[in-house]
Image (cartoon, rainbow, N blue to C red):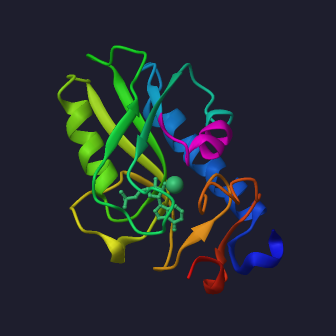
Amino acid sequence: MREDIERIFFSEEEINEKVKELGSIISAEFRDKNPLLIGVLKGSFVFMAHLLMKIDIPCEVDFMAVSSYGDGTISTGAVKITEDLSHDIENRHVIVVEDILDSGITLNYLTHYLENRKPASITICTLLDKPSRRKTPVKADLIGFECPDVFIVGYGLDYAERYRNLPFIGALKPEIYS
Ligand code: IMP
Ligand code: MG
């Protein structure tokens, strides 16, 4: 598996450090607000688990499953909600937890979808951001790392459902997906 990785962008230690920082920011900003963290499956489940343990205020967790990619590396552009929330979010402070913000298509769709349910606030927290790839305007409120326009895997991120279990984030060798 590791032999398929061309280059490591963010090591396990760097990621842990960053996740700790994000957890502290959320803990400070949402004290007494009992925020609801909404993980966007599947990619965000690793980030969600680690972030959650770095948040030291009362909070709740929910998940949504969204698919827009199929098995390829390029978004099909069509977003489908395959699993909806189990919480009512009216008047709740929601924090959307994403693995990576790429074209913005997923989060743009999701933000509108959530807005219609009248939450008190929506905060977008993404571990990774590829700003150069944006097709629809979306701005994350909390960003772990900016990354270049290369397809990356690990720490929950997959290529055709594989590599999610790598503890670091790295670029796949192009011959793997071309
Ligand atoms: P967007 O709708 O194009 O912003 O894509 C968001 C989703 O695409 C993320 O939640 C990921 O699941 C997936 N994605 C985007 N870029 C990558 C990548 O470099 N590696 C793995 N998955 C990616
Ligand atoms: Mg994916």
On screen, residue 8 versus residue 71, left or right, reads right
Magenta span contains residue 40:
yes
Farthest left residue? 116
Residue range corresponding to the magenta coloring: 39-51
Identity of the residue drawn at 61% across and 58% down: 158
Q: Position of residue 159 (x, y in %)?
A: 60, 63
Q: Position of residue 112 (x, y in %)?
A: 20, 39
Q: Nearer the viewer, residue 67 or 36?
A: 67
Magenta span contains residue 48:
yes
38 versus 42 height, above or below: above
On screen, residue 154 versus residue 100, left or right, reads right
Q: Quadrant of the N terminus?
A: bottom right
Q: Nearer the viewer, residue 135 or 3?
A: 3
Q: Nearer the viewer, residue 157 or 47?
A: 157
Q: Position of residue 163 (x, y in %)?
A: 71, 60
112 versus 68 height, above or below: above
Identity of the residue drawn at 48% across and 69% down: 73
Q: Quadrant of the C terminus?
A: bottom right
Identity of the residue drawn at 51% across and 43% down: 25
Q: Position of residue 51 (x, y in %)?
A: 62, 41
Identity of the residue drawn at 40% across and 22% down: 85
